[in-house]
Image: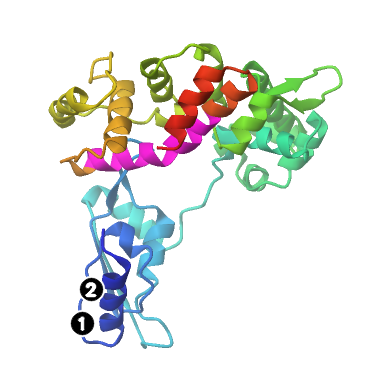
Amino acid sequence: GMVRTDRELVEDLFADRHIAVLVSTATLAWGVNLPAHTVIIKGTQIYDPSKGKWTELSPLDVLQMLGRAGRPQFDSEGEGIIITAHSELQFYMSLTNLQLPVESQLVAFLPDHLNAEVVLGNVQTIAEAVEWLSYSFLYVRMLRNPGTYGISEKAFKNDPVLKQRRLDLIHSSACLLEKSQLVRYDRRSGSLQATPLGRIASHFYISHESMAQYNRHIRPTMTEIELLRLFATSGEFKQIHVRQDEKMELAKLAARVPIPVKESTEEPSAKVNVLLQAYVSRLKLDGFVLAADMAFIQQSAARIMRALFEIALKRGWARLTKLTLAFSNM
């Protein structure tokens, strides 16, 4: 990427009107805070490694970029131009008219958030968790738009404060956490207690699915090959897929990495394993999308390995503790 000194120089030249046109990547554009008369967004798709595919820019990102056109203290008017596919035209027309409501995404991540609250001590019973959920944006949107969250008109009429719905969500989340051994859930008293695994998950932002996977497969005598295989099956990488145009480069990388990869390079877990080793070994990648995937894996690698280290340490497994610590420091 561009070094900070070069970026600041270009920004200063543009601000002083020595440069009339400033061209930026989507990533850099989020950090550029310069007023302009006209902002042109050429193409609205960016690659999202967390989803493993090309996605549309979020409405907030588009509004942030367009908001730099015609700042009141610098210009009397501004112009925003969006160049996008015809299929997305209605979406951006709705965006300019502010017709897109913002909905909560908390339900999909509720177990992990509940675990964090239990670990912090803010929530100690199911009743407290139900009350805690009433302060969320999810609860606000359920009241305003119940149909979107699977709440029928009859259910909403019988329970206008949605207490039973909140109870069902919390109970389901608590059961998932109990199954993953992150909390102790007493169904009689409704008490929730954090476990050592739950504290590790909360501290290192590890999903309950990944912690359940680690708990099932971690062993005190694991080798480097087995440890990397376990790492590659983490739920954090479930959106990473192997594309047709990547197979040849992944096969070449697999032959160069120091630790053998037993799985076929057509397997997503093998891709994660190869890209982690490629990052550690400082191997050069050709494809942009592959490099973006490697950056995404690298960002999560340290905390996942540190979580595995903490699990091994708490169980008194000296050999695995030493191995995970070595990977954590890479």
Q: Is residue 298 magenta?
A: yes
Residue 91 in view (yes/no): yes
Q: Which residue in the protein does label 1 denote? A: 19
Q: Is there CB contact under 8 Å for labels 2 and 1? A: yes
Question: How many numbered discs sit on the rendered protein?
Answer: 2
Q: Position of residue 248 (x, y in %)?
A: 13, 27
Return the residue nearer the eye: 154 or 258.
258
Magenta segment, prevailing SS (helix, strand or loop): helix
Q: Which residues are magenta?
A: 289-307
Secondary structure at badge 2 equals loop
* Residue 134 percent across, percent down from the top left: 73, 43
Q: Amino acid under label 2?
A: Leu
Residue 290 at what x, y percent from top left? 24, 38
Rendered image quadrant of residue 176: top right
- Please identify the quadrant where the N terminus is shown: bottom left
Q: Is residue 70 magenta?
A: no
The type of colouring in the image is rainbow
Q: Using the numbered discs, state the Cα–Cα distance from disc 2 to disc 1 in whole angstroms.
A: 7 Å
Badge 1: residue crowd in 10 Å (few <14, some 14–19, many ≥20): few
Q: Would residue 296 be found to the left or right of residue 41 on screen?
A: right
Q: Nearer the viewer, residue 124 or 253?
A: 253
Residue 19 sits above or below residue 137 on the image? below
Q: Which of these two is toward me, 10 or 138?
A: 10
**Residue 53 visible here:** no
Which residue lies at the image location 51% right of the left edge and 12% below the top edge? 219
Residue beneath disc 2: 22
Quarter of the figure that contains the C terminus: top left
Mark 1 lies on a secondary structure that is loop
Residue 239 x %, y %: 37, 31
The answer to whether 177 appears left or right of 103 in the picture is right
Q: Is residue 176 above or below residue 19?
A: above
Image point (44%, 37%), residue name: 329
